[in-house]
Image (spheres, rainbow, N blue to C red):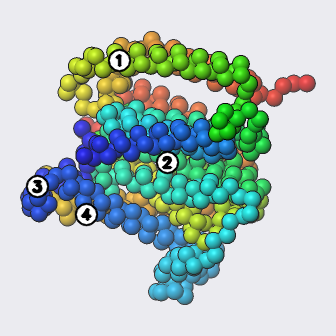
Amino acid sequence: MNQTVVSYLSQYEFYDVLLAAFGKNEGLLAFAIYLLGGVIIVGLCATIGGLGTFAERKISADIQQRLGPNRVGPYGILQFLADGVKMMTKEDVMPFTADKMLFYLAPMLALVGVFATLAVLPFSSGLMMADLNVGIFYLIAISSLVGVSVFLGGYASNSKWSMLGGMRGASQIISYEIPVTISILAVTLLAGGMSFGTIMSHQRGLPTNWFIFHNPFAFIAGFVYFIGALAETNRAPFDLPEAESELVSGYHTEYTGMRFGFFALAEYIEVFVVCGVGAALFLGGSNLPFDISFDIIPLQLLEVVIFMSKALALYYVVIWIRWTFPRLRVDQLMAICWKYLTPIAIFNLIGCAVWVVVFNGKSIAELIFGH
Amino acid sequence: MFAQFLFISSALLTLGGAVAVLVTKNIMHSCIYLLASLIGIAGLYATLGADFVAVTQIMVYVGGVVILMLFAVMLTGGKDFVSRAQNLLGLAPSMGNRWTFSVGILVALVFLATNIKLILNVSKSIPAKTFGNEFPSTVNQIGHLLVKEHVLAFELSSVLLLGALVGAAIIARPRKQ
């Protein structure tokens, strides 16, 4: 059944000590572990989101031959904290004709949708919060809350820019969900399961075992996933919902202070999440590049480091793409999704299915080098 | 204890959302309350151990149906439909006359009777059909059932969806003058 961080930790001796300390109350101990794990992961990912804004400015500065933020802290690395303080102390303005309830609800829904995905993000083979049987499916489903929040933010502000941004955002997110989901389906087909544990256990060892190098169709599916994920998180060149030269700032034009901060934070964390999912599905996830027969906590921490470095490398690519490519037009955006990505994704799915049947699920490397 | 907490909170969310959908006068707000109610139903599925169904509920309703409803409401007017003349008890915005209300009540009664009949049957047959440890997870069970025992229903529903897709494409297509 479902593996969790609690069931992983229960194989160690210190779990029994902890259990005794909690008066043999397993439920209470599980609750404490989940609470602690949740606080750590949410804090970590919020920091990554904050540092994401800093990285975005610094990398864009590099690309444009500027210096970027360099006043607060060494290399300006504390800039995001200063920004956070600024946002929290700013005046909270709400437009007079705004729909009050929805206006307050939208930024929170965005954060809820993103934080809920962190529950299944596979930081390592043992230390992920919950390895659900429906893991990747759960992640796709719950992240659609972000789409609702983008739309609501646009509607509730009762301004034309916001409304256009919100409608663009919702239609874009719904459309690009289809090629992304079909690409993920190709991977679940190869792995034979939807849980991240199953998917990553099929990619153990050298990079030749990664699903992106499994067969030509999976290779294309990896790129389709990445392009679709860029569009789903509203990143350039697909940042039409917040296109600043056309729509001022899109769905969060009317948001100020920390409510705007929620939207921005949700976006940066979501980028990290889709990068992490891409790393787990196609780039081997947190697997060590060699086989080890025993399992200790420091090894798990090493796996966390590997997962993080893969995800953050993808994060760098996302930022790099943003500052390299010009923005698309709306009709081009929809044409790319429906006329190119979706047919390619369906072709990949069928190709992967045929590959699994014909070659008995073996990867290219296995076919060439024996096993 | 956790299962009870999950059940009570999802049941409250479902019922509270459903009541709020009826009571609120703003149609956009009622869409959002409907969202809460549907998430509560997903929680109820999760309490029953049907994780795949719960996630599908969120996927289909939150990701698809509610956003489409919001779109439809916005494109057809939204705020102007705040309230109409005939309010039952002065509570809910009403959209009909005596005739529609009586038909609605009749349909509700028939639906209620059918549901009670179904629920009574369920509570009588206590030993539910279990699959044992044959499959490692509910995903495998559902997949097995879909392509083995219920393959006809599966294929028919996919044909139905394909038909809907083609129909939508034909309606949305620009006509030659």
In the rendered image, the quadrant that contains the C terminus of chain B is top right
Question: 10 Å neighbourhood of mark 1: few (<14), some, or many (≥20)?
Answer: few
Which tag is nearer the camera, tag 1 or tag 4?
A: 1
User: Do discs 4 and 3 share a chain?
Assistant: yes
Give the SS element for disc 1: helix
At 43% across and 43% down in the image, what residue appears? Answer: B12
**Residue B13 in which image quadrant:** top left
Give the SS element for disc 3: loop
Q: Which residue is mark 1?
A: B120
Give the amino acid at mark 2: Ser
Residue B73 vs residue A370, the one in the foreground: B73
Residue A161 vs residue A340, the one in the foreground: A161
Q: Chain of mark 2?
A: A
Residue A121 vertical position relative to residue B61 in the rendered view, above or below = below
Q: Chain of mark 1?
A: B
- Outermost residue, front side: B89
Q: Is residue A110 left or right of residue A200?
A: right
- State how far apart marks 2 and 3 are (Cα): 37 Å
Q: Is residue A107 left or right of residue A241?
A: left
Give the amino acid at mark 4: Leu
- State how far apart marks 4 and 3 are (Cα): 28 Å
- State how far apart marks 2 and 4 are (Cα): 27 Å
Give how far across and how far down residue A25 sits, in percent: 15, 54
Res A204 visible: no
Q: Which residue is mark 2?
A: A143
Q: Which residue is mark 3?
A: A24
- State how far apart marks 2 and 1 are (Cα): 37 Å
Q: Which residue is mark 4?
A: A301
- State how far apart marks 1 and 4 are (Cα): 53 Å
- State how far apart marks 1 and 3 are (Cα): 40 Å
Res A7 visible: yes
Which tag is nearer the camera, tag 2 or tag 1?
A: 1
